[in-house]
Image: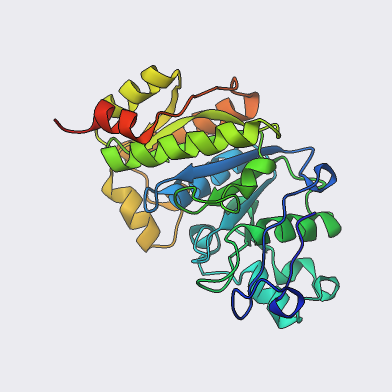
Amino acid sequence: MTELIPQNRTTAGDGEGSVQFRPERPEGLITGARVFAVYGKGGIGKSTTSSNLSVAFSKLGKRVLQIGCDPKHDSTFTLTKRLQPTVIDVLESVQFHPEELRPEDFVVEGYNGVMCVEAGGPPAGTGCGGYVVGQTVKLLKEHHLLDDTDVVIFDVLGDVVCGGFAAPLQHAQRALIVTANDFDSIFAMNRIIAAIEAKAKNYAVRLGGVICNRSAKTDQVDRFNDKLGLNRLAHFPDLDVIRRSRLKKATLFEMESTPELEAVKTEYLQLAQRLYDGTPPLVGKAMKDREIFDFLGYE
């Protein structure tokens, strides 16, 4: 099980509040629910995608839990209308004695019954960005909050640069990558594919597909997918209503109806149904950095 190791219990010397990542043992992994981990370049719209996908699952009658895995703890604010305290916040408030916590201390019910948790992260510059994922899952299990859950969505920060950021892949059956139709987004996607490759050697996770976001066209994404044998699951264009929904702290399902918004909502509902029914496991072989630069870069 992932352990929480406060600074006074470690010799790592990483600074105040430092905590270290420990890989999950099989008995600590989530079972019984469809588990998805959403990755992509920073700022690509992972939280918007995750939150609207969570609502879409709930509209299909599924019991949904969304876990934000970013120190900004803003994954679920459109679902709950405010920033929620993180698991690390509430653990610190009880001096890291998790037995003193109640479910309502770290789980909040959001729009349409979606349950929301913000895992958070360690203090800046200390420890590992992924350690608290395991502690969050441990708390959820101890309070039996996963027993009646149909779908779990991990909304994971930015690019994958260490094993801690990849920790949600240990729990997920399918990893989803959100990308735009540009070089930087696809370059980050390639690195995420490499991380999924590595985790798939020891865990059940497989790549589920690619979601194209904030893009009028999908030609470069489709070209990359064709090269690696991947597929595009959905396409959400760069619409102003999506930008306004974040400003209004609302999901798209709460915004005033327009024909273009109804089309986006339908796309989310179809994506949720497709994911719940089960997507085939994809095996993408990531390109080397130089190779992808030559493939997508300018002459």
Name the spot of residue 114 as percent of width and height, x first: 63, 52
Q: How is the image coloured?
A: rainbow
Q: Is residue 202 left or right of residue 142?
A: left
Image position of 9 with respect to 179: above or below: below
Quadrant hosting residue 230:
top left
Residue at screen point 53% across, 43% down: 38
Residue at screen point 66% across, 39% down: 172
Q: Nearer the viewer, residue 152 or 1?
A: 1
Name the spot of residue 139 as percent of width and height, x first: 78, 61
Q: Is residue 152 left or right of residue 190?
A: right
Name the spot of residue 206 as percent of width and height, x first: 61, 29
On-image quarter of the N terminus: bottom right
Image position of 138 with respect to 154: above or below: below
Name the spot of residue 191 as percent of width and height, x first: 44, 39
Residue at screen point 74% across, 55% down: 137
Q: Is residue 46 left or right of residue 43?
A: right
Q: Nearer the viewer, residue 266 or 95?
A: 95
On-image quarter of the C terminus: top left
Residue at screen point 51% across, 69% down: 82
Image position of 247 with respect to 59: above or below: below
